[in-house]
Image: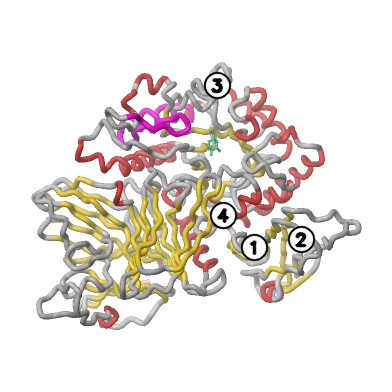
Amino acid sequence: MSIIFHEKTKVFHLQNNAISYIMMVLPNGQMGHLYFGKKIHDREDFGDLLETAPRPMSSCTFEGNKSFSLEHIKQELPSYGTGDYRSPAVEVRQENGSRISSFQYHSHHVGSGKPKLPGLPATYVEDKAEAETLVLDLYDDVAGIWAEAFYTIFAEGGVIARSVRYINKGSQPVQLSRAMSLCLDLPDCEYDWVQFSGVWARERHLKSRRLTMGIQSVGSMRGNSSHEHNPFVILKRPDTGERHGEAIGFSFVYSGNFLMQAEVDGHDNTRVLVGIHPDTFEWQLGLKESFQTPEAVMAYTDLGLNHLSQAFHKLFQKRLARGYWRDRVRPILINNWEATYFDFTEEKLVHIAEKAKECGVELFVLDDGWFGARSSDHAGLGDWAANKERLANGITGLAERIEGIGMKFGLWFEPEMVNKDSDLYRSHPDWILQVPGRPNTHGRNQFVLDFSRAEVVDCIYEMMAKILREAKVSYIKWDMNRSITECFSQAYGPKQQGEIFHRYILGVYDLYERLTSEFPEVLFESCASGGGRFDPGILYYAPQGWASDNSDAVERMKIQYGTSMCYPISSIGSHVSVVPNHQMFRNTPLHTRANVAYFGTFGYELDLNKLTEEEIEEVKGQIAFMKEYRSLLQFGTFYRLKSPFEGNEMAWMAVSEDKKTAVVGWYRILNAVNGAFTRVKLEGLCGEFCYENSQDGSKHYGDELMNFGLITSDATAGQQPENQAPCTDYESRIYVLKAIG
Ligand code: GLA
């Protein structure tokens, strides 16, 4: 890896063995973009890649020169109003009302490693040799604003991380009304735009369309990254598939309002912007003050989408997630939510835990309803102390009993919210986000605490920390069950109301940071009505997240498949729940529910006492299986093989680092009579190894399994097979392949 600077031509070339990222100082002093893609040879002068040409009717920078127009030139930190009519990366509103700015190159420095972003989640290095960072110092001398543009290239893989820090060195305060984290201008538009979108209980479905002239975007203005859109987008060549082809993935390490967009201009240039959503953002930059944007991460591959996902998995698992649990297999848990909802007593919970312990479950999680006056979703949020009528011995007593059974104990919190029927609200009615004189919108009967205020965060911290100090709590499920409305803080003046969304999320990060620092061995799982805040920002604090409130196995196939495009399997919270399923009312076989949940953190969301003896035996087998293979499933190399968005079958697999063991999951949604022969071409095996198949003991070389495929046809041909259970709808199988000899 190296960052080369050609003094004469003012060209910067960031490269490692996979990629090149090239830019230069333009004749007008701004930074121009030249190339991002597969590694290319270095040379002194890449100026011709700018592709300037006389465009008769364009707005041009230099009098008498019709070739240099910012309208067409690929740039690094473009602004609006000096010739470029595309969406800008930055907008500075100055005291005189002007929004025109132009950031010029001043100097730069290169350092090994990667600096931290204060107060914000970001990728990191453990050893300085893992990455190099270029910082460009750019300035707008009229406004007196400086921009430090950070570019980190990692030694391995196709990843570049970017962010910008703005500093007011001028003599007047300004307002940042747009501060995107990344701008990438690409020289053509031959791409499919792939996004991961949905709604509550249908998160991160893969949706794709061809780029065309104009703007296509995803984003959130809900205060969280949202169920609707995820801060991850892929631009892929139209013929790129899982196994081959070019693609660039863009990910935003942030949990609040975001915008990701691609704008194609009339000459087929594509501008990608990633950052905080400018429609809900303004930041006052007083004298000597600075503003740090969150980090955006982009990755290039020419080896297909599986390869792209693996790059994100590795980065996010090893250099974004942190702490005690980062590299540890995740405990198999049982959560009481779907088993009891609000209707529980200490005895009932212990009864559920005891049966789970008998089956091999390691962690019991008490969900919503244990605190304050919380007997429904109308009351109690904000009062984080046990309800003694329900739990006479408090959380301390219950946790001790659970530990006494031989299990760990986990607890649900929703720290950012309050019900009006709560002691917290009664004593601090001004602590919620609300606009004076206007009605306030609720969501699930709850209101949003003003986390932009330090005293609010302090108060919640004290309540949570007290419980964690007193009781043996090993896990926290941190929920957030509504989007933000009426985003207005009583603590800030009129000019700063545009800062509240961002200050709110900084407050969330602050609380996470304090809790994870004081209780480093507590495992945090994030949740927002399921997958409403499943993003890289949260992964920095909570290494796993509840992927969706939809626990139906068939629905989970699409949700987890879409999620796997960016997020590591160890981060995907997935459980076996009861049938008929509580969201879909569908009956799926117990083995299929587990076969889907294995590709995640794994656990149960039901009362095992209600299962038959036969089912309990099956559950014991599932837990034993997960314990044996979870290290491979959660930390192995993951491949998607067949997409549930394209047909009736889905398949995926995980391979161990030494390629000696692989676990393949195969799933068929509806059964077919006398169906076709089916097989799945596997990936990532060693062609030279001979593997034994756990399903039937057959032996095949890796090259055969990867080129002919693993045979998945079955006996169902319109009649009951002899000595075999017939296949039904929602059939699935797990194949364990082990290298022999
Ligand atoms: C959200 C979560 C659920 C559960 C409930 C409790 O919906 O996603 O898993 O914790 O809240 O109210």
Residue tagged 4: 569
**Between discs 1 and 3, the one toward the N terminus:** 3
Image mark count: 4
Q: Residue furthest front?
A: 57
Q: Are marks 4 and 2 in contact (CB under 8 Å)?
A: no
Q: Is mark 2 within 8 Å of ligand 1?
A: no
For discs 3 and 2, the disc positioned in front in the rendered view: 2
The residue wearing badge 2 is 672
Question: Contact (CB < 8 A) between labels 4 and 1?
Answer: no
Q: Earlier in the sequence, mark 1 or mark 2?
A: 1
Question: In the rendered image, which residue does mark 1 sit on?
Answer: 647
Task: Look at the image and give the residue range highlighted in magenta.
Answer: 439-468
Which residue is at a point 22% across and 40% down the rendered structure image? 496
Which of the marked residues, 4 or 3, is nearer the chain's N terminus? 3
Quadrant holding ligand 1?
top right
Mark 1 Cα shell of 10 Å, populated few (<14), some (14-19), many (≥20): few
Pair 1/3: label in front: 1
Identity of the amino acid at label 1?
A: Gly
Sooner in the amino-acid sequence: mark 3 or mark 2: 3
Characterize the local packing of mark 3: few (<14), some (14-19) or many (20 or more) Cα atoms within 10 angstroms: some
Quote the CA–CA distance across marks 4 and 1.
22 Å
x and y, in percent, of residue 739 in the image: 72, 67
User: Camera-side residue: 4 or 263?
Assistant: 263
Nearer mark to the viewer, of 4 and 2: 2
Q: Quadrant of the C terminus?
A: bottom right
